Amino acid sequence: MDLRLTKTQNMFKRAAADFLKAEAPSHTITEWFGSKAAFLPDLYRKAAALGWLGMVIPERYGGASTSFTDCAVVFEELGHGPLPGPLFSSGVLGALLVLEGASEEQKKTLLPAVCSGKSIVIAAVADGGVDWGPESVETRLTRTTDHLVLDGTKRFVYDAEAATAFICAARTESGEIALVLVNRESPGVSIMPKAGFMVSVAEVRFDKVRVPVSSLLGGAGAGWQILDRALEKALPILCAYQVGACQEIFDFTAEYTRTRVVFGQPIGRFQRVQDHCVEISIHLDAARWVTYETLWKLDSGVPATAGVHEAKAVASEAYYQVCNFSHMVHAGPGTDYGHPLMAHSVMAHTLYQYLGTPLQHKRRMMDALYPRAGSRE
């Protein structure tokens, strides 16, 4: 197993770093997070023009047909920002849900628009705040003579305000889970942004929303299987974004320990500060190596289900804890919303529960390693 980056991957990495430097420097990102401006259409269009949406989608559908690691190195750099917006939620997860579940006709219609940035397709899955798994889907889907009716509320939808359409998970009359494509402008769809220590999260209500039968993705009972297949490919890319964020925090925290002088010496000479930096390094390394090992497995065709869940658990926990230990080093200055650490703290809290908490993914990892009777795996 060789985890060194190729020349092409290093090129992608430099391009993403240059993009951040030119379009989203640190002081600009802190302003966006301070004002909760998570979706910036002009920036999203520029990212789409660089081909960063649908990188892993086949070229015949408007994607770039890159490897998962190729895509991940771009998202690792974007995590340094942390760059907000639906680049992952639509350009990776939304696109993969369509690729895994849609009919050929639906793919040809939907995917080019997603890959070009003209359409932003956001997954609306769990009805509870931090619940995850098939049991978290409570929204009801009923069928009439000529259409489908959605009724329910999704309380944690990431990047909902940017959406042009939602892929909504709903429970059919027979108790099975289906995925339905819903236009944001459909009567009965309402979006309410969430306040608090999060970014780009909203509650989406589907109040007896009528959609055509042709909006169903895959079979009526195949919804969670489609979601699992898409997540197995998408989650390691999200983890790479979190790795990039952890690396950025490590870098500016280490620099701070060299330049902040207390009692006549840099604070990096104090053992307790060193302990905090070691903790940051440990979490960073754990997230990086489990993420890139999993990406290697996906690109090599090696079974990766357990690794995917392990990576999401480790990377989400790492980002959360790296922020905590960096706050211990920075103390008061790190709590100012003008400091880049606060943007990362808000994003870390948001991603901690996005698509399942670390505890939920540890359980899924164990189910994959040691299957039990009745397990979802």
Image: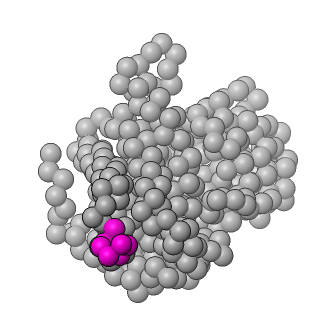
Instruction: Identify the image's colour scheme: rainbow, by chain, secondary structure or one colour.
Output: one colour
Q: Quadrant of residue 198?
A: bottom right
Residue 210, above or below 224: below
What x and y, as percent, mark residue 177? 64, 34
Residue in front for this viewpoint, 54 or 10: 10
Residue 263 on the magenta span: yes
What x and y, as percent, mark residue 304? 32, 37
Residue in front for this viewpoint, 363 or 282: 282
Q: Quadrant of residue 249?
A: bottom left
> Horizontal placement of 151 versus 346: left or right?
right
Q: Residue furthest top?
A: 373
Residue 110 on the magenta span: no
Quadrant into which the N terminus falls: top left
> What residue is at 34 percent from the left and 38 percent from the top?
307
> Horizontal placement of 38 versus 142: left or right?
left
Residue 288, above or below 139: below
Q: Quadrant of residue 298?
A: top left
> What residue is at 34 percent from the left and 68 percent from the top?
267
